[in-house]
Image: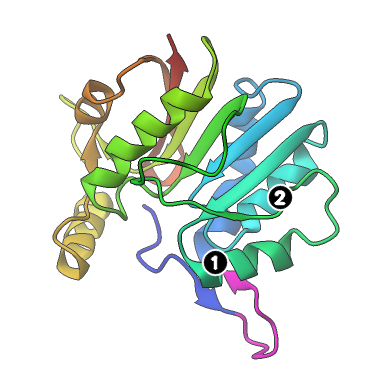
Amino acid sequence: MADPTPWIAAEDHGDVRKHAPATLRNRGAIAESLRGILPPSGLVLEIASGSGEHAAYFAEEFPTIDWQPSDPDPTALVSIAAWTEGLANVRAPVMLDAAADSWPVVRAEAVLCINMVHIAPWEATLGLMAGAAKLLASGAPLILYGPYRRAGVPTAESNEAFDQSLKARDPRWGLRDVDAVTAVATGFALDRLIEMPANNLILVYRRT
């Protein structure tokens, strides 16, 4: 189950870095899955980078790839910059709202989005698909990670509780159905679904 609190402030009040508790738990497993999905080089655009901890970890795990973190929250951009400071293969974070019609990035070899689809209005998912389709060449991956519902597969009780907590915070949020996400993935084909720890999934779409 994803953490209902996306991030917390650093204990040192002079430290601008935020901390997402779920990152330490899931980053290793995500990285292992990414090894068989990401291209050997090129630019990976991360949508909704949050605290920046994933970007920092993946940049060290994949040193031949250039990482472009992004987020719509100005405080997140500050945190991302702090976490990734000194990493030669991480570009300066950019402000990017997935739901926006235009993005500040014009090309990428892959797009990665971790734990955003359920903690955002549905319009963000629609924008993610549209924006990624503009950036990616045929065969390039759009990779989503998080908790999802699947037809014919019972949803874990912990994920059901998480879904209710999300909707209590914002009725526009909540777990999405894999079929619903795939239905709006115009220009993409679902390449694979990977079961991950703690009742999460990785969905890999390829640009057609």
Q: Is residue 156 visible?
A: no
Say what secondary structure mark 2 lies in: helix
- Crowdedness near tag 1: few (<14), some (14–19) or many (≥20) residues, C-alpha within 10 Å: many
Task: Locate residue 195: give its quadrant.
Answer: top left
- Which residue position holds label 1? 76
Q: Which colour scheme is used?
A: rainbow
- Which residue position holds label 2? 57
Q: Mark 2 vs mark 1: which is more N-terminal?
A: 2
Residue located at (30% from left, 54% from top): 120
- Crowdedness near tag 2: few (<14), some (14–19) or many (≥20) residues, C-alpha within 10 Å: some
The stretch in magenta equals 10-20
Q: In this view, does 5 lie to the left or right of 85?
A: left
Indicate yes or no whether the magenta region holds residue 15: yes
Where's residue 61, x and y in %?
A: 76, 40
Q: Is residue 183 visible?
A: yes
Give the residue type at disc 1. Answer: Ala
Q: In this view, does 71 lie above or below 9?
A: above
Task: Please name the predominant secondary structure of the magenta segment in the image.
Answer: loop
The answer to whether mark 2 and mark 1 are in CB contact below 8 A is no
Indicate yes or no whether the magenta region holds residue 151: no
Where's residue 54, x and y in %?
A: 62, 51
**Camera-nearest label, 2 or 1:** 1
Q: Is residue 136 above or below residue 34?
A: above
Residue located at (64% from left, 62% from top): 80
Say what secondary structure mark 1 lies in: helix
Task: Locate residue 176: give its quadrant.
Answer: top left
Q: In this view, does 67 lie to the left or right of 126?
A: right
The image quadrant where one finds the C terminus is: top left
